[in-house]
Amino acid sequence: MAINLNNSNIATRENRIGSITGYVGSLKDLASQSECGSLKGCSRCFSQSSTCLSGCALNQLSGIRDVAIIHHGPAGCSVAGSSAYYMSRVMSKKRGVTSETIYVGTDMNENDTIFGSTETLRKVILEVNKRYSPKAIFVSSSCATGIIGEDIDSIVDEVRDEVAVPIVAVHCEGFKSRIWATGFDISDHAVLQEIVQPPREGVKTNKINFKNFFESARPEIIEMFKNFDLEPVFLYCNSTIEELSHLSESIATTCICGTLGNYLGNALEEKYGVPYVRSINQCGIIGFESWLREIGKVTGRSEKIEKYIKEQRAIYIPQIEEVKKELKVLQPYLEWGQVIHLRFQGY
């Protein structure tokens, strides 16, 4: 399905890529039907221990430095503010930078859910812009605004000239999808719509967009990519609006997890020709080397990456073989819930 950046709303993962939340059948059918796009899921009437796609979307956006998140919904929706605080203040301090990202709720009441509160939203946007001077403003919907059909797009368009910074509507009603990872797509869509700019003519960089959670292993990844003359741009935790505006100029896009980054990667490739590195997850030797080789293929650095793989194998394969000797007394088995247990024998 083509990505349409002219519309602030996007298709859910169920409709866009045929994702499912439950399956009954054989592994053979699961694999074959997934490949041909005919996979159908069973309908689950009960689910627990999941999360809300709204939280996924807003947590991603709140990691961007010096922006404002305006969540148009009842006071209860502001529970997401605690995660926003962690993403902005705690993670920036850990990195050694500062972030003035703020999270604001519009505190809709019963009267608002009957008669609407777009005028209140308008006032909140203007006051937030005046008081905090954010680098960008993300105006998000909620379940309540989605149910009553609150038109946040019109309000965003009305105040665009008054705020004079990038502002975009984020449609992340929690009920719109059973797959919470749709929230990742929604945050990517918002960034692509308003923040990312077309590449500047003649600009060539060695930057590679790297989407992961919380900038995990940032020093190690930077050091590794130096071997390939690549400079990773970590998304979105501690990103700046200036950095995000130039994502279209990067040499490629990769991610730690396809679930997290496939929308951004596919969109940058479709709209701006930035290659998206498609590979299995970087788990184990095969997964890690396959990922690196795919990066080498799309960036023209295969020779450097093969040299790096050979060097790392010489260091770590002997160590792995020694560890395997210690594990010969263990027999792994898989239990329901995909939890790996090790059963000791002879002890």
Image (spheres, rainbow, N blue to C red):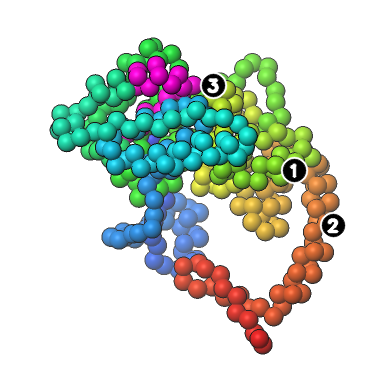
In the rendered structure, the answer to whether residue 176 lies left or right of residue 210 reads: left
Instruction: Tell me the quarter of the image containing the N terminus.
Output: top left
> Amino acid under label 3?
Gln
In the rendered structure, the answer to whether residue 85 lies left or right of residue 303 reads: left
Q: Which residues are magenta?
A: 125-141
Q: Residue at x 15, y 29 (%)?
A: 115
Q: Earlier in the sequence, mark 3 or mark 2?
A: 3
Residue 197 numbered mark, or none: 3
> Amino acid under label 2?
Ala
**Relative depth, front residue between 193 and 67:** 67
Q: Residue 222 location in percent, x, y? A: 71, 39
Position of 39 relative to 27 (above/below): above
Query: Which residue is labeled 1 in the image?
Result: 224
Distance, label 3 to label 1, CA atoms, is 28 Å
Q: Residue at x 79, y 59 (%)?
A: 316
Instruction: Label 3: state its secondary structure.
Output: loop
Query: Which residue is labeled 2 in the image?
Result: 314
